[in-house]
Amino acid sequence: MTLFDRLLGRTAAAPSQGNPVVSEANLEVLRQTLATLIDPDTGKDYIASKCVKNLQWQAGVVSLDLVLGYPAQSQFAARQAQISAALLQLDGVDSVTVNVSSVITAHAVARGVPLQQGIKNIIAVASGKGGVGKSTTAVNLALALAAEGARVGVLDADIYGPSLPTMMGVADQHPETIDNKYIQPILHYGVQTMSIGFLIDPEQPMVWRGPMVTQALTQLLNDTRWDALDYLVIDLPPGTGDIQLTLSQKVPVTGAVIVTTPQDIALLDARKGLKMFEKVGVPILGVVENMSMHICSQCGHMEAIFGEGGGQKMGAEYGIDLLGQLPLDLSIRLNADAGRPSVVADPEGEVAGLYKAIARKVAVKIAAKSQDFSSKFPKIVIQNT
């Protein structure tokens, strides 16, 4: 109030009751509470993970944004319930609003390898030998990531024996070309799919030498018009040959998933695949153990037909995580053969839940890697004047 106001007998205006100022002390109480809550997928608290944004507390109403660095759409409600229950225990908190979302960013790859246009992260799914369920795992992993809210593509890198068209239920489809230069991927189940199987006769054998195979792979990857993918899952052929080396050295692979069975022979070959990726500088995201346990469909008896503990032992030996163990289940094979993999055939089933849990672990591993900011760097052009 000014001296002139006092002389005229004017009184000071009452303070505005519109939006009370939020005290830093109140916000600190919220942060301390959130720091005690653990994200089940990352194992870290929400404050340490730096995923809490726009934290506010006004007139008993608390609101915040929880921004996860990995897709977890099936877990959004559980995260909201977890945080709301904890904050409602605080004095003065009458209601809580939690907005959960996921933001997927591109992450760093090997030096000297630029990121692929239209793709943020590339996941290679590999095995040392055939017959361990690698392609089935790759397809269900891609579908699980999509089910969790990510934009996903899957590339069949097995030139000699492409199986993804059949597994994805699109064997009778053919991709369209764009300006006779690019190929449009086949979109099915919300996943963009590309395979040499779309371009050849199903009964035509690919009698190609190594250089032709690697050229075909790079063309499939580079000439496909991938549409703003968060993840591209590449299903590699078994072994450690030309395709694996080409992929490792020329393709910006964010990380690799090794698929094996508990059987000792399968583990021997899986170790070779793991060591190959280590030598070429591709991070190992973890191991998936397929056919870990057979459950009898008649009596429910469980039996470890291919042995047990192999994937866990391999993970401990090389310091990598066991991402998950999948049962030897008849439905997995039947669904894949029918073109409706488990994640879409029975999305709320136990097997689909296992694949989704593996997908979240893979995405969490990628989110923990350093981000790639090369797209933000200005391009420097040197010209002679």
Image (cartoon, grey):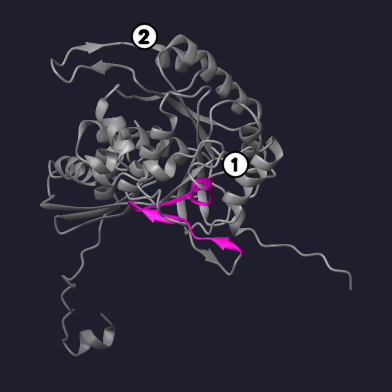
Residue at which label 1 appears:
109
The part of the chain drawn in magenta is 181-200
> Which tag is nearer the camera, tag 2 or tag 1?
2
Residue 187 belongs to the span the image colors magenta: yes
**Residue 142 position by quadrant:** top left
Instruction: Give percent across and percent down for residue 124.
Output: 51, 36
Q: Which residue occupies the extreme bottom position in the image?
A: 8
The disc label shown at residue 45, or none: none
Check disc 2 and report its element: helix, strand or loop.
Answer: loop
Q: Residue furthest right?
A: 385
Q: If the image is split into quadrants, where does the N terminus sit?
A: bottom left
Callout 1 secondary element: loop
Relative depth, front residue between 271 and 305: 305
Disc 1 crowd, CA 10 A, few/some/many (<14, 14-19, 20+): many
User: 13 or 59: which is nearer to us?
Assistant: 59
Do callouts 2 and 1 mark residues in contact (Cβ within 8 Å)? Answer: no
User: Is 373 located above or below residue 130 in the figure?
Assistant: below
Query: Where residue 307 is drawn, which disc sits there?
Result: 2
Name which of mark 2 and mark 1 comes first in the sequence: 1
Mark 2 vs mark 1, CA separation in Å: 35 Å
Q: Tell me where residue 195 appears, x and y as whole percent.
A: 50, 47
Tell me if mark 2 has few (under 14), some (14-19) or many (20+) residues whose alpha carbon lies within 10 angstroms of its own.
Answer: some
> Residue 196: image x %, image y %?
53, 46
At label 1, the amino acid type is: Val
* Residue 192 to residue 12: above or below: above
User: Which residue sits furthest front?
Assistant: 203
- Point 27% across, 40% down: residue: 34
Vertical arrangement, residue 215 with respect to residue 39, above or below: below
- 150 drawn magenta: no
Residue 168: name its quadrant.
Answer: top left
